[in-house]
């Protein structure tokens, strides 16, 4: 294998690939990037056995060949390489990295045989639909913060994707048992994916898809067997889905009957951040003292002291007090774009529903705490 490649083109692809390669695995091959050089360029692949990424970089290929190159070290060398054109050459299982025309800069990396690299899923005949990159980023942003992080809640450790019956919506749902986020967006040809029942996309897979979609205006999304697929020019990302039945999230969404409490989003968000400083770090308990026209936030800690702040609201009704984990509310408020938010609160046994007029299709739920 011998080729000349431009630094910027290689670096952009390597930045994606090295985040997929498993640096902590006991299998050394999983910490590498597979190089397959052929006429016109080089195909690069990385996997941790759950996620996989294939990409292509144009290059001047003098001699075709294959090699598995240490992902992180190769990325660091290329990132700080001072010249734009880089010569890569296989020397009996070592990758020689030099500048074109001289060897003033010289690196030699120990590599592994290409045949040891795992086979990635075949996706050629998968049915795909087009999605705007910005839409996919929004749907992930507005749900991923609710994904469970505890290993004991494996089935909740991803985002649930489905197509609600009799709609042309794509729905993302995430919950950790204490809170829930759901967003619907209209998507053309959604029926192609046959998302009824839905699928569970792992958290890390969603994070990687978000990185890709942030850079690409239009992507293709699809499914094949037990993998999700995200494709774009010169790029194919695959992710093994979580196997299992997602819980009936609809059962915890209350029927809204009461009028909402209207609050200024930014002012409430800033107040919650300030007031939660004086609270137990694990649960961040804050009391919502609701009365006509005024919300008083109260936090107390036996060793730290007490905090109190008033926020103007629009509300007409009886006074009441509910307690919440401030972080859960902050997470919801940070992903909303509405200037004013709607809170539907009933009692400590009923989830608080959070919506925004300018965030159509989004719903957030936060369970009140029984005590502070």
Image: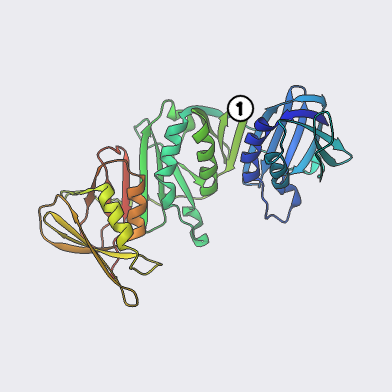
Where, quadrant-wise, is the C terminus in this rendering?
bottom left
- Residue drawn at x 63%, y 40% is 15
Q: Toward which corner of the image does residue 9 lie, by quadrant? A: top right
In the rendered image, is residue 162 in sight? no
Q: Where is residue 236 in the image (x, y as percent from the top left)?
A: 61, 33
Relative vertical location of residue 14 with respect to residue 60 in this rendering, above or below: below
Position of residue 225 in the picture relative to residue 147 (left or right): right
Q: Quadrant of the N terminus?
A: top right
Q: Residue furthest bottom?
A: 303
Judge from the rendering whether residue 172 lies leftward or rightward of residue 207; answer left or right: left
Q: How many labels does the image show?
A: 1
Q: Name the residue under label 1.
A: 125
Residue at horizontal 77%, vertical 26%?
38
Q: How crowded is mark 1: few (under 14 residues within 10 Å), some or many (20 or more)?
A: few
Q: Where is residue 126 in the image (x, y as percent from the top left)?
A: 58, 29
Q: Where is residue 204 in the image (x, y as percent from the top left)?
A: 54, 48
- Residue at horizontal 42 percent and vertical 33 percent from the top: 135
Residue 70 in sight from this viewpoint: yes
Scheme of image coloration: rainbow
Query: Where does the image place residue 356, in percent across and percent down from the top left?
Result: 26, 42
> Quadrant of residue 340 in the image?
top left
Indicate the secondary structure of the residue bearing disc 1: loop
Taking the view exactly as shown, the residue that stands out farthest to the top is: 40
369 and 33: which one is in front?
33
């Amino acid at each position: 294998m011998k080729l000349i490649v431009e630094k910027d083109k290689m670096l952009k692809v390597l930045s994606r690939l090295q985040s997929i390669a498993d640096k902590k695995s006991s299998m050394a091959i999983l910490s590498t990037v597979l190089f397959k050089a052929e006429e016109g360029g080089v195909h690069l692949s990385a996997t941790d056995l759950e996620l996989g990424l294939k990409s292509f970089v144009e290059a001047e290929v003098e001699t075709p060949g294959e090699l598995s190159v240490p992902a992180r070290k190769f990325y660091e060398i290329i990132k700080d390489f001072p010249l734009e054109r880089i010569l890569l050459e296989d020397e009996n299982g070592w990758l020689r990295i030099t500048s074109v025309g001289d060897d003033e800069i010289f690196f030699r990396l120990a590599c592994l045989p290409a045949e040891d690299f795992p086979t990635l899923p075949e996706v050629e005949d998968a049915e795909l639909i087009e999605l705007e990159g910005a839409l996919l980023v929004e749907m992930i942003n507005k749900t991923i913060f609710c994904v469970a992080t505890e290993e004991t809640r494996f089935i909740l450790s991803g985002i649930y994707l489905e197509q609600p019956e009799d709609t042309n919506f794509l729905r993302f749902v995430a919950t950790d048992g204490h809170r829930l986020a759901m967003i619907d967006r209209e998507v053309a040809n959604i029926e192609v994916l046959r998302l009824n029942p839905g699928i569970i996309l792992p958290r890390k897979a969603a994070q990687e898809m978000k990185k890709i979609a942030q850079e690409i205006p239009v992507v293709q999304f699809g499914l094949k067997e037990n993998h999700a697929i995200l494709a774009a020019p010169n790029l194919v990302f695959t992710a093994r889905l979580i196997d299992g039945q997602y819980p009936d999230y609809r059962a915890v969404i209350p029927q809204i009957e009461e009028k909402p409490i209207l609050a200024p989003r930014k002012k409430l968000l800033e107040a919650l951040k300030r007031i939660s400083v004086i609270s137990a770090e694990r649960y961040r308990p804050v009391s919502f003292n609701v009365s006509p026209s005024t919300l008083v936030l109260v936090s107390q800690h036996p060793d730290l002291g007490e905090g109190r702040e008033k926020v103007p609201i629009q509300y007409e009704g009886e006074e009441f007090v509910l307690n919440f984990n401030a972080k859960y509310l902050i997470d919801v408020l940070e992903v909303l774009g509405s200037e004013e938010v709607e809170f539907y609160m009933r009692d400590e046994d009923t989830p608080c529903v959070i919506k925004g007029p300018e965030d159509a299709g989004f719903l957030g739920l936060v369970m009140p705490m029984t005590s502070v």
